[in-house]
Image: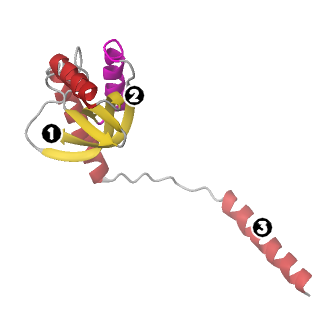
């Protein structure tokens, strides 16, 4: 009895699936106004970043500043990691001498000091800076972390 019941259920479900595939439907696209607005703001921000030339060129990823401060997920470039504190401060000073407009962050996780630079929301900007820094610093890496942004 159970076999016939299961077989009947399977057959009915198969017919439903086949009949659902035969119907021709109309595809409707629903666009969220919020997503459109976010895309427009992103486009405007991207254009403002490159309009002055500060986002491109010799100092990649430096945004135009308007005074609003926020935090977001992003990228930083590590330029030093080691146990010597004075070497960490020297690497930080060397970087600040070259890039006065980018932030530097010195951190300590026992037993290492780490110097990370920049606040990038775009990995390609962090990669461009990393490529430039390879000439001046020995071991350069990109890290994903919470960054400070000023718009």
Q: Nearer the viewer, residue 99 or 24?
A: 99
- Left or right of residue 20, residue 96 in this image: left
Q: Where, by quadrant of the figure, is residue 16 drawn?
A: bottom right
Distance between the Cα atoms at labels 2 and 3?
A: 55 Å
Tag 1 residue: 150
Labels 1 & 2 near each other (Cβ < 8 A): no
| Label number found at residue 14 | 3
Q: For label 3, count other residues whose C-alpha is less than 10 Å away and answer few (under 14), some (14-19) or many (20+).
A: few
Secondary structure under tag 1 reads strand
Q: Nearer the viewer, residue 50 or 132?
A: 132
* Labels 1 and 3: the sequence-earlier one: 3
Residue 130 falls within the magenta-colored stretch: yes
Magenta part of the chain? 121-137
**Depicted 30 relative to depicted 116: above or below:** below
**How far across and how far down the image is residue 10, in percent?**
81, 73
Q: Nearer the viewer, residue 71 or 106?
A: 106
Which mark is in front, 1 or 3?
Answer: 1
- Left or right of residue 35, residue 50 in this image: left
Q: For label 2, count other residues whose C-alpha is less than 10 Å away and answer few (under 14), some (14-19) or many (20+).
A: some
Which mark is in front, 1 or 2?
Answer: 2
Tag 2 residue: 141
- Left or right of residue 15, residue 103 in this image: left
* Predominant SS of the magenta segment: helix
Residue at horizontal 50 percent and vertical 52 percent from the top: 27
Q: Where, by quadrant of the figure, is residue 122 drawn?
A: top left
Secondary structure under tag 2 reads strand
The single residue placed furthest to the top in the displayed view is 135
Say which quadrant the C terminus sits in.
top left
């Amino acid at each position: 009895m159970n076999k016939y019941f299961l077989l009947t259920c399977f057959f009915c479900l198969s017919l439903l699936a086949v009949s659902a595939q035969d119907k021709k439907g109309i595809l409707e696209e629903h666009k969220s106004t919020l997503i459109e607005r976010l895309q427009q703001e992103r486009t405007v921000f991207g254009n403002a970043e490159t309009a002055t030339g500060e986002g491109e060129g010799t100092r990649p990823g430096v945004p135009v500043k308007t005074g609003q401060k926020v935090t977001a997920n992003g990228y930083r470039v590590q330029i030093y990691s080691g146990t010597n504190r004075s070497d960490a401060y020297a690497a930080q000073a060397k970087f600040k001498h070259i890039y006065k407009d980018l932030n530097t962050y010195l951190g300590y996780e026992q037993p290492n000091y780490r110097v990370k630079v920049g606040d990038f929301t775009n990995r390609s900007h962090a990669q461009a800076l990393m490529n430039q820094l390879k000439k001046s610093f020995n071991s350069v890496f990109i890290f994903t972390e919470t960054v400070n942004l000023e718009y």
